[in-house]
Image (spheres, helix red, strand yellow):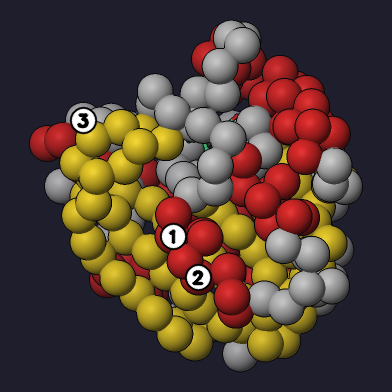
Amino acid sequence: MSASTPPAFADAAQTWNKRFSTEDFIFGTEPNEWLREQAHVWQPGQRVLCVADGEGRNSVWLAAQGLRVDAFDIAEVGVAKARRLAAARGVQVNYTVTDCDSFNYESGAYDGVAAIFVQFADPAMRERLFASILRCLKPGGVLLLQGYTPKQLDYKTGGPPQASHLYTEAMLREALADFEVLTLREYEAELKEGDRHTGISALIGVVARKR
Ligand SMILES: C[S@@+](CC[C@H](N)C(=O)[O-])C[C@H]1O[C@@H](n2cnc3c(N)ncnc32)[C@H](O)[C@@H]1O
C-alpha cells in the first residue's frame, strides 16, 4: 500500500478478516441480485474485474457465466474463502489480495467492472477508485455498481454508518461524468445476502458505459 493513500479506516484488512473468519459466507454464496439482473451486458469470454470482491460470491458466479474474471480484496481470509468457493464450483478466477489503491489496474484491459457494495471508500478514496475503474475499462466497457443511499441509515440493514460513503443519484451522476449512464435506479428491496445484508434496504444500482 502506498504511504500517501491509506485506506478509509486504518485496520480495514484486520476488520474484514475478522468478519470473514467464520465458516459461513457472511454475504452468502449467491451473487448480488443487481449483478445477476444486469450481467447480460457482458458476453461469455469477455474480461471482467470484481473490485473488493469479499468471499467471492460475485466473481465465482460471473466465471460460471463464461466470463474471464479477475478479482481482488483487501481481506486475505475473504479471498481464501473465494478461492474455495471457485474450486467447489469448478471455475477459474484470478484472485489478488490487495488494497484498492494498490491493485495494478491494467489500462483499457476490461470489458466490465463489478463494484458491488464498495462503500468502505470515503469520498477521497471513492474518487481514486472510480478513476481507476474508468482507466482499466476499454472504451465501451461497462461498470455495474450497487450501493446504499442515505435512507439506509434509517434501515440499518447493512452498509457503513457514514453518510459520506453512501450514494445519491446526483453524486453518482457527477462522479461518473466520463461514463454514459445507461441505467440508474434508486429503489428499495428486501435483501437476503447472508447475515450482513438482510432486510428492507435503500439501494441504488447503476449500469454505466465508458465513453
Ligand atoms: C460489503 S463487503 C462487499 C463484498 C463483495 N463485493 C460482495 O458484494 O459480496 C466490502 C468488501 O470490501 C473489502 N474492502 C474494504 N476495504 C477495502 C480496501 N481498502 N481495498 C479493497 N477491499 C476493501 C472488504 O474486505 C469487503 O470484502
Q: Quadrant of the N terminus?
A: top right
Q: Is residue 172 shown above or below 87?
A: below
Q: CA distance from mark 1 to mark 2?
A: 6 Å
| Number of numbered discs overlaid on the protein picture | 3
- Residue 197 falls left or right of residue 67: left
Residue matched to label 3: 156
Secondary element at image label 3? loop
- Residue 88 place in picture, x, y as percent: 79, 32
Q: CA distance from mark 3 to mark 1?
A: 20 Å
Q: Residue at x 75, y 55 (%)?
A: 64
Amino acid at circle 3 = Lys
On the question of residue 124 being in view, the answer is no
Q: Residue at x 64, y 31 (%)?
A: 55
Q: Is mark 2 within 8 Å of ligand 1?
A: no
Amino acid at circle 1 = Trp
User: Which badge, 3 or 2, comes first in the chain's sequence?
Assistant: 2
Q: Residue at x 72, y 86 (%)?
A: 139
Q: Tell me, yes or no, whether the two marked residues, 1 and 2, touch with CB atoms within 8 Å.
A: yes
Residue matched to label 1: 34
Residue matched to label 2: 38
Q: Nearer the viewer, mark 3 or mark 2?
A: 2
